[in-house]
Image (cartoon, rainbow, N blue to C red):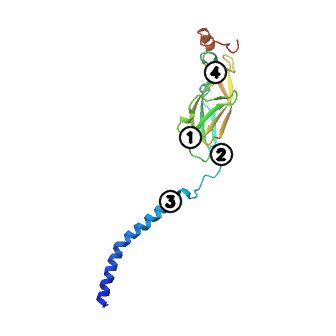
Amino acid sequence: MSYPAIIELLKKVGVVLALLSPLLLFIKQFREAFTGLLRWPFKKRESLAPSEHRVELMITPGFHYHCFWAEASNGVKPMMQVACKLNVANTGPTDIFQIVDAYIEKPRTRAATPLHMERPYGGRLAHQVSLIFFVDPPVRKSGEPFACDITLIDQFAKPHTIKGVNFIHLGGEGWKAMKANGLIKTEIPGQ
């Protein structure tokens, strides 16, 4: 083979390599992406370190008129409607928190408010959480104050309790009026 023929052959090989190199690079990257995608479900992931306190809530009751109880009825017997607004702030390492359930310790009563539908709370600001409970049977007479412990459950199923929340009685003697109108058929507390 003569020298000019070798040069001509090298030029052709160079052109072919110049045309093939982007294609080969694309095939290499595609292969890496595809094999990575196939390995992805089995890849060992960094998980959150188990923590006792991902969400730490500071809970305080709202103004005194934000925590009250009123006389109510289920149509047959008396019950207490207990309502409050709590100021809740997260001091834990998780930025976002969500209240998914709430209950009164004694008498054990779950919140009537659908808390799992609430949006998550973010940031380090205090957020106001409104709760409504129905206590059946009533544990106070008409006009008496009521105090109890309220527990909030966060998205990690961890309880956060505020002790001794005081509720003022709101309204008059509603049970007597309900009894007179036939909305209560059983005895009224305190009579």
Q: Residue at the location (61% across, 39% down)? A: 154
Helix, strand or loop status at disc 4: strand
Within 10 Å of disc 1 (Cα), the crowding (few <14, some 14-19, many 20+) is: few
Q: How many marks?
A: 4
Q: CA distance from mark 1 to mark 3?
A: 43 Å
- Residue 125 - label: 1
Per the image, the residue denoted by label 2 is 53
Q: Do the residues bearing badges 4 and 1 touch, measured as CB atoms within 8 Å?
A: no
Q: In x, y percent, where is residue 131?
A: 59, 29
Q: CA distance from mark 3 to mark 4?
A: 59 Å
Helix, strand or loop status at disc 1: loop
Per the image, the residue denoted by label 3 is 38
Q: Do the residues bearing badges 3 and 4 touch, measured as CB atoms within 8 Å?
A: no
Q: Do the residues bearing badges 3 and 2 touch, measured as CB atoms within 8 Å?
A: no
Q: CA distance from mark 2 to mark 4?
A: 34 Å
Q: CA distance from mark 3 to mark 2?
A: 36 Å
Helix, strand or loop status at disc 2: loop
Q: Compare residues 60 and 99 and report the one nearer the observer.
A: 99
Helix, strand or loop status at disc 3: helix
Above or below — where is 97 with respect to 83?
A: below
Q: Residue at the location (66% across, 38% down)? A: 159
Q: Residue at the location (59% across, 34% down)? A: 87
Q: Nearer the viewer, mark 1 or mark 2?
A: 2
Q: Earlier in the sequence, mark 3 or mark 4?
A: 3
Q: Earlier in the sequence, mark 4 or mark 1?
A: 4
Above or below — where is 13 with respect to 118?
A: below
